[in-house]
Image (tube, helix red, strand yellow):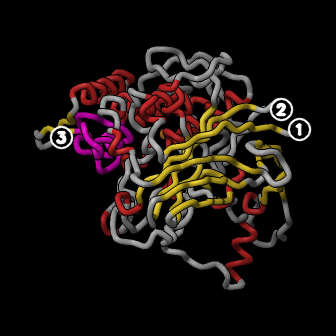
């Protein structure tokens, strides 16, 4: 579906592949830590897949999704062996260590730069944009398939593919996060091989972030609240659609993580009129062992909560931003019934630029725990004039969930590497923290029963 004639060109798609999964794996670890569990370990093709998994779901026509017993070993398939995939992985790791990719036309492509991650993302996924599919294969896609078919590798029992082979179902399987931890570690090796940002690259001259806090209305400063709400899923499209059978409403009630809306409050001193890009990130303060997280460990874990532009006037500026406006999230999808109703009333419009992916808004905050779990909220201000990839108004609405989904039919508006400034290693934390356009606070996420 990436054929040029379909006009689905997505700018920085390889980088987005890295970044969206980077955030998903980190975000999953936040839930693990919230539930007193250690962070996910990376998958290893030489070791058994520790957790078995039963999907509890069926195909419409091909029966149940296959389950996987505990401690299954990876198995060769008729069209790809475990060794093949291990070679692809090794070649990619070698490319990172050497700092260049081998193009299929024989050229060496330098990846020791800002754009390197994009080419790397295309070969790791791999997408049709891979510069050398026969040499680098398709590490990520093939690993999905190895996991999906591990219970019936020779197709002896005629089992259908597992959940790992479909976008809609893959994240059900805990092995998804083990696989993506592995992939994320490969990207980390690349990102951390690049030189740290210089003081100049990090600075926003004349702009000082003097205070960072969050307010949940009716509660003390820096207290955030999560809870489980009851949600009714509309299941009417899962019913028998034969003619002559009358339609009935059917819903399933599930508990879902949600949170109280809150406001970010930032105080900024500016020497002049500027437009700032405000980048907000969150990561746990303590690790699984209850120790304060090492700076290097924490910086790689930061998840983007929001990214927006704001006008600064000379002097003091008070910025308030609602959590509901997050650039990382999307609202609930419409149910089948609602789509049908809107379609017949003419309310359903095709929006060319609307993106349909993103982190579910209700899951913006990790669960935290009953006693309150401490997280570090960091804010980084950068200069819109330096960051804009093309001429556009800072207020231009680029649609929901830029941070997770990029743009469709358009250039990506923000020139900075995704995840900036935490995408690279930081060697001198004292200097980093002394950057005046940087600020942080600790927040407490309390889970209400
Ligand atoms: Cu995947």
The answer to whether residue 410 is above or below residue 160 is below
The answer to whether residue 150 is above or below residue 28 is above
Rendered location of residue 327, percent (x, y): 57, 57
Residue stretch rendered in magenta on the structure: 111-138
Q: How many marks?
A: 3
Q: Residues within 10 Å of mark 2 (few under 14, many from 20)?
A: some
> In the figure, is residue 273 to the left or right of 221?
left
- Outermost residue, bottom side: 346
Rendered location of residue 70, percent (x, y): 63, 18
**Which is more toward the observer, 124 or 35?**
35
At x 29%, y 50%, the residue is: 129
Is the C-beta of the residue carrying label 2 under 8 Å from the nearest atom of ligand 1? no
At x 38%, y 51%, the residue is: 416
Q: Are marks 2 and 3 in contact (CB under 8 Å)?
A: no
Is the C-beta of the residue carrying label 1 under 8 Å from the nearest atom of ligand 1? no
In reply to whether residue 133 is colored magenta, the answer given is yes
Q: Which quarter of the rendered picture does the C terminus lie within?
A: top right
Residue 370 badge: 2
Q: Are marks 1 and 2 in contact (CB under 8 Å)?
A: yes
Helix, strand or loop under label 2: loop
Tell me the CA gap for discs 3 and 1.
54 Å
Helix, strand or loop under label 3: strand
Mark 1 or mark 2, earlier in chain: 2
Rendered location of residue 202, percent (x, y): 39, 44
**Which is more toward the observer, 218 or 388?**
218
Q: Residues within 10 Å of mark 3 (few under 14, many from 20)?
A: some
Q: Residues within 10 Å of mark 1 (few under 14, many from 20)?
A: few
Q: Which residue is mark 3?
A: 109
Q: Which residue is mark 1?
A: 449
Q: Nearer the viewer, mark 1 or mark 2?
A: 2
């Amino acid at each position: 579906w990436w054929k040029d004639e379909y006009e689905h060109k997505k700018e920085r798609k390889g980088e987005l592949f890295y970044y969206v999964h980077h955030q998903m794996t980190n975000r999953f670890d936040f839930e693990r830590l919230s539930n007193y569990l250690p962070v996910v370990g990376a998958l290893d093709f030489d070791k058994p897949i520790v957790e078995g998994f039963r999907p509890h779901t069926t195909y419409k026509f091909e029966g149940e999704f296959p389950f996987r017993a505990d401690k299954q070993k990876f198995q060769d398939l008729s069209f790809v062996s475990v060794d093949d995939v291990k070679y692809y992985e090794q070649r990619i790791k070698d490319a990172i260590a050497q700092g260049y990719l081998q193009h299929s036309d024989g050229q060496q492509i330098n990846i020791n730069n800002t754009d390197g991650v994009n080419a790397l993302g295309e070969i790791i996924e791999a997408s049709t944009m891979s510069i050398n599919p026969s040499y680098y294969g398709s590490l990520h896609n093939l690993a999905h398939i190895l996991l999906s078919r591990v219970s019936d590798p020779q197709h002896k029992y005629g089992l259908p593919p597992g959940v790992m082979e479909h976008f809609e179902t893959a994240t059900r399987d805990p092995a998804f996060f083990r696989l993506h931890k592995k992939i994320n570690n490969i990207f980390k090796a690349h990102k951390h091989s690049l030189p740290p940002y210089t003081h100049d690259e990090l600075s926003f001259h004349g702009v000082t972030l003097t205070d960072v806090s969050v307010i949940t209305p009716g509660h003390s400063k820096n207290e955030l609240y999560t809870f489980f709400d009851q949600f009714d899923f509309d299941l009417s499209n899962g019913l028998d659609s034969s003619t002559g059978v009358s339609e009935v409403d059917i819903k399933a009630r599930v508990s879902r993580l949600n949170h109280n809306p809150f406001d970010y409050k930032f105080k900024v001193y500016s020497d002049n009129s500027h437009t700032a890009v405000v980048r907000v990130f969150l990561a746990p303060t303590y690790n699984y062992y209850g120790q304060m997280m090492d700076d290097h460990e924490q910086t790689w874990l930061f998840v983007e909560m929001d990214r927006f532009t704001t006008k600064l006037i000379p002097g003091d500026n008070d910025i308030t931003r609602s959590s509901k406006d997050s650039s990382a999230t999307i609202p609930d999808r419409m149910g089948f019934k609602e789509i049908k109703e809107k379609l017949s009333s003419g309310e359903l419009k095709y929006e060319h630029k609307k993106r349909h992916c993103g982190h579910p808004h209700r899951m913006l905050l990790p669960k935290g725990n009953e006693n309150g779990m401490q997280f570090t909220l960091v804010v980084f201000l950068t200069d819109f004039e330096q960051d804009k990839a093309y001429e556009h108004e800072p207020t231009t609405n680029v649609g929901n969930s830029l941070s997770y989904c990029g743009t469709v039919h358009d250039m990506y508006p923000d020139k900075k590497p995704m995840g900036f400034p935490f995408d690279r290693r930081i060697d001198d934390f004292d200097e980093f923290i002394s950057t005046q356009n940087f600020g942080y606070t600790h927040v407490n996420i309390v889970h209400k029963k």
